[in-house]
Image (tube, rainbow, N blue to C red):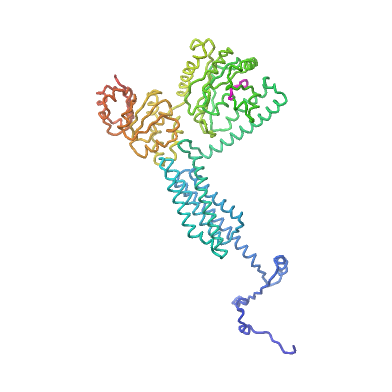
């Protein structure tokens, strides 16, 4: 201890081999930096950091804090880059599909895959680190690929009916297997980093495949549809959900009120309830007016006041018909089915509003209905019995006419046009369009135009009702009335087809309208064409009773027409595989739109049964004299088409 100690020179420390001096002392042109290691408890870190905060030329470095800061910055960078990548992917998808709807259908599963992956990682307590952040970008790329494969497979099936989704699913499964073989085997690794990479890969790939196989087809069917479901847009879905939410909320309020009133006074249904009826009528009207893209019109040319009770009969093709009838006047009651009358949710409201169940027989309710008549109420009935699939008016049942005869009431026909296109049976979607309600003149019990017996009146009044409805259709349905519905069902059949059909409808709207007027509502038609089936669908939409046998020269066009929603649900169209097969059909109308059509190609007896021959576009270039030689004369002609009628 009495020795004379001197400070060691730095070179003296080179003799110590257990550590390197360069790890702790660094000297350069800026000076010398000396590093000291201090082991502390995590609880004391903040206190020590504060203690060294004001010491000059001293920097306190917490390695754990540095690592966490670095990882946080890495996460932020990854999230920012992921956001940029999503924007680029969305732009590429939109440019490729040229459709916001298809872009959403393809991109939503990508987001869902990411959320599922992160959620499952949280459930199994796998934290983000630099390695699984990198692997997540790999999973994101696979999710994009799987979504695109699935969308393309679904689109092919939607367009032509060719079952390609199975092939695309097989490709995805092979991708999953090879990825698992390459990365998933790391789950057996002992190193924790390799194990984490493998687990995150397996979770992400599994989520991507699950979403592509299950949720994405549901999204596609919801928005694009298939042969049994019409396509919709996101805006249609949003407006419909809001309208039905409003309707359900108002219906709930009315049901609760009715339940309370009926519990307190079970005979309240026998009273007029004027305030309730006025509120309900206004509520029904307000539901229809929640959609600003749906136009409404009530035509009352005879100034009907509903002061005198009557039986109101109307065609029924949509849920909206109930609202359209209910908004006409407060003093109206419905004939309803038992499941509505006895419903636990709306049954009390139906009973308090004076509704009467018809399934048990209207003859049993005469006394009750007479009482309602005395209170000034009219009765609403839908004589078809249930909703129609289209706007075609079906056979009228006798119930409403029996009641009118027994109660001595006028029959008040009400035409409802447009509801079957806006919200058809089986759909909760309310589309853009128009609903027109027209109140026809009353039919008195002794009206000489119709039989007085209720057994004969349904047929006669039904015929009158259909003729008036056809007249209303002709007034409302202009040259472009069906174009939006038709284009809606070609929108995702291929960009080239869609543009061609859209251009053709615009160019030939006048000839097509004339053709619709020339051909009878129940005619049988043979159509030979080089188009895409748009005229066939127009003919069918204009009248569902037309039977149409169509041959399209283009193979893909035939497949698209066969696989069209309108073909399956709104028409009697049969797509033929050859012109010869089509000409074997017995028909009274022949439409030709083929280059070089030979009048001698059909048998002579076939031309003999044709009453109307229409040469359109390419068919218009055929030799007219050859047709005139077979007994046809020109009935209507312009620069686009010619209509010939048979002299026989």
Q: Is residue 101 left or right of residue 38?
A: left
Q: For residue 533: magenta?
A: no
Residue farthest along the bottom direction in this orientation: 3
Quadrant location of residue 491? top left
Q: Position of residue 41 (x, y in %)?
A: 70, 68
Residue 446 visible in the displayed image: yes
Frontmost residue, 428 versus 180: 180
Q: Position of residue 170 (x, y in %)?
A: 44, 50
Q: Position of residue 353 (x, y in %)?
A: 64, 23
Residue 638 visible in the displayed image: no
Above or below residue 637? Residue 37 is: below
Quadrant location of residue 480? top left
Q: Quadrant of the N terminus?
A: bottom right
Quadrant location of residue 551? top left
Q: Quadrant of the C terminus?
A: top left
Above or below residue 112? Residue 448 is: above
Q: Position of residue 406 (x, y in %)?
A: 57, 13
Name the residue located 38 percent from the left edge and 31 percent from the top edge. 574
Residue stretch rendered in magenta on the structure:
327-337
Q: Is residue 621 left or right of residue 353?
A: left
Count of labels shown? 0
């Amino acid at each position: 201890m009495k020795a004379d100690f001197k400070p060691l020179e730095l070179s003296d420390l080179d003799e110590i081999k257990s550590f390197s001096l360069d790890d702790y002392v660094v000297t350069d042109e800026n000076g010398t930096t000396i590093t000291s290691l201090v082991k502390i408890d995590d609880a004391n870190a903040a206190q020590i950091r504060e203690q060294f905060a004001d010491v000059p030329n001293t920097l306190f470095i917490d390695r754990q804090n540095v690592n966490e800061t670095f990882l946080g910055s890495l996460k932020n960078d990854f999230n920012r880059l992921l956001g940029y990548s999503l924007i680029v992917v969305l732009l590429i998808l939109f440019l490729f599909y040229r459709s916001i709807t298809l872009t959403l259908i393809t991109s939503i599963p990508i987001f869902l895959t990411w959320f599922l992956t992160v959620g499952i990682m949280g459930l199994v307590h796998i934290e983000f680190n630099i390695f699984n952040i990198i692997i997540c970008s790999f999973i994101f790329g696979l999710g994009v690929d799987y979504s695109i494969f699935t969308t393309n497979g679904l689109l092919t099936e939607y367009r032509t009916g060719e079952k390609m989704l199975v092939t695309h699913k097989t490709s995805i499964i092979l991708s999953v297997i090879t990825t698992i073989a390459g990365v998933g085997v790391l789950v057996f690794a002992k190193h924790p980093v390799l194990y984490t990479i493998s687990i995150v890969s397996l979770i992400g790939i599994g989520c991507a495949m699950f979403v592509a196989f299950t949720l994405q087809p549901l999204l596609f069917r919801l928005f694009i549809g298939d042969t049994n479901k019409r396509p919709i847009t996101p805006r249609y879905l949003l407006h419909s959900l809001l309208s039905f939410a409003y309707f359900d909320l108002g219906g709930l309020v009315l049901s609760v009120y009715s339940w309370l009133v009926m519990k307190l006074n079970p005979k309240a249904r026998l009273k007029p309830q004027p305030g309730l009826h006025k509120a309900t009528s206004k509520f029904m009207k307000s539901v229809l007016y929640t959609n600003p893209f749906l136009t409404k019109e009530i035509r009352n040319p005879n100034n009907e006041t509903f002061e005198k009770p009557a039986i109101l009969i109307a065609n029924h093709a949509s849920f909206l018909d109930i609202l359209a009838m209910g908004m006409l006047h407060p003093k109206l009651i419905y004939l309803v089915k038992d499941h509505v009358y006895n419903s636990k949710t709306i049954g009390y409201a139906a009973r308090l509003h004076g509704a009467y169940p018809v399934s048990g027989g209207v003859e049993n309710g005469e006394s009750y209905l007479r009482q309602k008549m005395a209170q000034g109420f009219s009765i609403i009935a839908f004589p078809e019995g249930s909703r129609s699939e289209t706007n075609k008016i079906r056979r009228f049942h006798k119930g409403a006419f029996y009641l009118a005869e027994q109660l001595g009431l006028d029959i008040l026909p009400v035409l409802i046009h447009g509801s079957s296109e806006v919200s058809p049976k089986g759909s909760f979607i309310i589309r853009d369009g128009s609903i027109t309600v027209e109140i026809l003149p009353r039919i008195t019990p002794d009206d000489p135009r119709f039989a007085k017996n209720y057994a004969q009146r349904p047929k006669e009044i039904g015929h009158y009702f259909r003729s008036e409805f056809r007249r209303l259709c002709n007034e409302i349905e202009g040259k472009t009335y069906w174009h939006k519905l038709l284009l809606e069902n070609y929108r995702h059949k291929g960009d080239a087809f869609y543009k061609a059909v859209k251009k053709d409808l615009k160019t030939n709207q006048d000839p097509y309208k004339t053709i619709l007027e020339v051909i009878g509502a129940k005619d049988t038609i043979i159509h030979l064409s080089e188009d895409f089936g748009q005229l066939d669908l127009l003919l069918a939409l204009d009248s569902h009773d037309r039977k149409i046998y169509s041959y399209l020269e283009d193979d893909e066009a035939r497949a698209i027409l066969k696989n069209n929603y309108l073909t399956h649900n709104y028409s009697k169209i049969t797509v033929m595989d050859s012109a010869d097969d089509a000409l074997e059909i017995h028909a009274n109308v022949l439409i030709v739109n083929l280059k070089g059509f030979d009048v001698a190609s059909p048998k002579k007896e076939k031309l003999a049964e044709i009453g109307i021959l229409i040469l359109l576009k390419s068919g218009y270039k055929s030799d007219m004299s050859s047709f005139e030689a077979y007994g046809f004369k020109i009935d209507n002609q312009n620069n686009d088409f010619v209509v010939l009628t048979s002299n026989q």
